[in-house]
Amino acid sequence: MKALTLTLTVVWAAVFTVFLIGPSRAADITISLPASVEARDGWFYLGEYAEIYGDSDISDSVSMALVRHDGSFSRRDIIDALSYTDAAGREVSIVMPDVVEVVPEPEIAAELRAMTAWKWRIEIDVVPGNWAETIRGFSGYRLPPKITPGTRSIAVKLIDKDGRERNKQVKLAWYQPVVYATEPLLRNELVDVSKLGSRIGKAAVMITSFSSSEQLAGAVTRKTVNARVQIETGDVRQESFIRAGSTVTMVARSNGLGVEVKGIAMQRGGLGDIIRVKNLSSKKILKARIIGEDRVEINTETAR
């Protein structure tokens, strides 16, 4: 079906009021979506799949709109998602079919997200063609044994019916929420989380950015951070979130599921640091990354 353009004003109230406006009036923001998207089950951020144009502050907020789906979504679903963003009360142009089909993400993307505990979209780019065309005629594929989130390109081994392998270079784009300053943060200044904003962006190699403003609570800037600039781990310093010997919650994610167990920190560290922790149930000592106060995320590698 041909995509339709609807320009509207979303007014946050008990109900939404939609006003059509004439072509002579420019919208504050324009959102464009294709007829189908390859997405994970349940939900995604609008900025992972939509092209968003217009006022930069509103665009950032719109990119973080949470869209829930059950195999498809409609324009009404997009309007509902926008109600929790800065687009509420603004003139928005939505360019999309009446209903957008959601097809499963490529198997390779799902496998990569499971391997790396990545919560957001991983875009697969294969030239020429696409992944479905690339894998056609092969009985399977094998990923590298270790992949760092943010890696731009990997060599995938395609396996034919006779068991022979052929390397294929696959480009990756890792989407994630990133945190930026809405106004300049001065050097040696305690970070005020009210001066932070979030938007969907593409992750850098080695993942040096924050994905939530809460991760910066209690941080102090190492240098002046200009407005609208993405904040990276090297831009701030933090007091120890965890002390050696303290009880921590260990979070492990696999296939989109999270499991929490109690452990003991073997080292002190701040947000983002990798420390050794002891699982109180299994008595194993593991490597984990500090993701919050008394919370760590398990790394796939273990250390004795």
Image: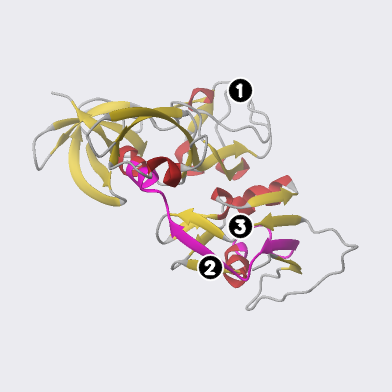
**CB atoms of marks 3 and 2 within 8 Å:** no
Quadrant (top left/top right/bottom left/bottom right) for the N terminus: bottom right
Give the residue number, with chain letter if any, for mark 1: 187
Distance between mark 1 and mark 3 Cα atoms: 43 Å
The amino acid type, in three-letter code, at marker 1 is Arg
What amino acid does circle 3 point to? Answer: Pro
Quadrant position of residue 28: bottom right
Q: So how many labels did they put on this image?
A: 3
Determine contact: label 2, label 1, CB under 8 Å. no
Considering the image in quadrants, where does the C terminus appear?
top left
Labels 1, 3: front one: 3
The kind of residue tagged 2 is Phe
Distance of label 2 from label 1 (alpha carbons): 45 Å
Q: Nearer the viewer, residue 62 or 234?
A: 62
- Residue that appears at 83% across and 70% down: 21
Q: Write down the region rendered in magenta.
A: 82-111
Which residue corresponds to mark 3?
34
52 lies left or right of 189:
right
Q: Is 86 in the magenta? A: yes
Q: Could you tell me if the residues under marks 1 and 3 are in contact, i.e. CB atoms within 8 Å?
A: no
Q: Earlier in the sequence, mark 3 or mark 2?
A: 3
Whether residue 72 is situated above or below residue 208 in the rendered picture: below
Nearer-N-terminus badge (1/3): 3
Whether residue 156 is situated above or below residue 55 in the rendered picture: above
- Decide which of tag 2 and tag 1 comes sooner along the chain: 2
Q: Secondary structure at mark 2?
A: strand
Q: Which mark is residue 73?
A: 2
